[in-house]
Image (cartoon, rainbow, N blue to C red):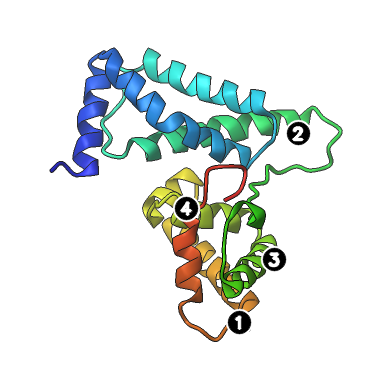
Amino acid sequence: MKSKKTGDLEIWNQFRKGENFALSFIYSQNIEFLYQYGLKFTSKRDLIEDAINDLFLDLIRNRKTIGETDNIRFYLMRSFRRKLVRELKKELRYSDNLLSEVFFDVSYNIEDEIIHEESKKNIYKCLSLAIEKLSPRQKEAIYLKFKSGFDYNDISEIMDMEIDSSRNLIYRAIKSLKKSISKYSDGTVLIFIFMKLRTLPSSNTI
């Protein structure tokens, strides 16, 4: 059985050789993921769609010269994030908005989750409040780590920061979450939370 890395490397190389089926496969496998990631930065869907279109147009134009990758989603997210953030910063400069930074945001829509046990409902409510206390960069790092499954090296490249900085960012975020849910004595609470981060439905929630 092929590993994901081997599969990604093969399909990427097929794309680089000009195989249209490979491009279609890459697009179909990642378009929704990129779109949902973009919604964490902005509700302006046209900007998100433009950034995705620009990303794939660049890939097509440069397919013969781009390097190899064994992690297609990481490659796409890193490039997509840079394009989207660049466009959002342009908008901020030419708007009356006093903000000078682009903010990543996530939230938990507890109503979208069917949770029968009262204890789990309380955990989600507590987590929702805890997430709101995190900084935008902490929210993004947690999203990339526990929702998207990227490692620290990938996160540091996607967010344009040092590896140690990405580790510290996530460490501080987890520490903040632990403090916020400290009323729960069960040590499995955080494990439950982070496992659920991977399985929450795709929407404008984490």
Q: Which residue is mark 2?
A: 92
Give the alpha-carbon distance from disc 1 to disc 2, as whole Å. Answer: 38 Å
Mark 3 crowd level (few <14, some 14–19, many ≥20, 10 Å Cα): some
Q: Which residue is mark 3?
A: 129
The three-letter amino acid code for the residue at tag 2 is Leu
Location of residue 174 with respect to 152 vertically, above or below:
below
Q: Which residue is mark 4?
A: 147
Which mark is in front, 2 or 4?
Answer: 4
Mark 4 crowd level (few <14, some 14–19, many ≥20, 10 Å Cα): some
Asked if the residue under mark 3 is in contact with the one under mark 2, i.e. CB atoms within 8 Å, the reply is: no
Asked if the residue under mark 3 is in contact with the one under mark 4, i.e. CB atoms within 8 Å, the reply is: no
Q: Earlier in the sequence, mark 1 or mark 3?
A: 3
Asked if the residue under mark 3 is in contact with the one under mark 1, i.e. CB atoms within 8 Å, the reply is: no
Q: Secondary structure at mark 3?
A: helix
The three-letter amino acid code for the residue at tag 1 is Ser
Q: Earlier in the sequence, mark 4 or mark 3?
A: 3
Q: Earlier in the sequence, mark 2 or mark 3?
A: 2
Q: Which residue is mark 1?
A: 182
**Is 66 placed left or right of 146 in the picture?**
left
Residue 73's tag is none
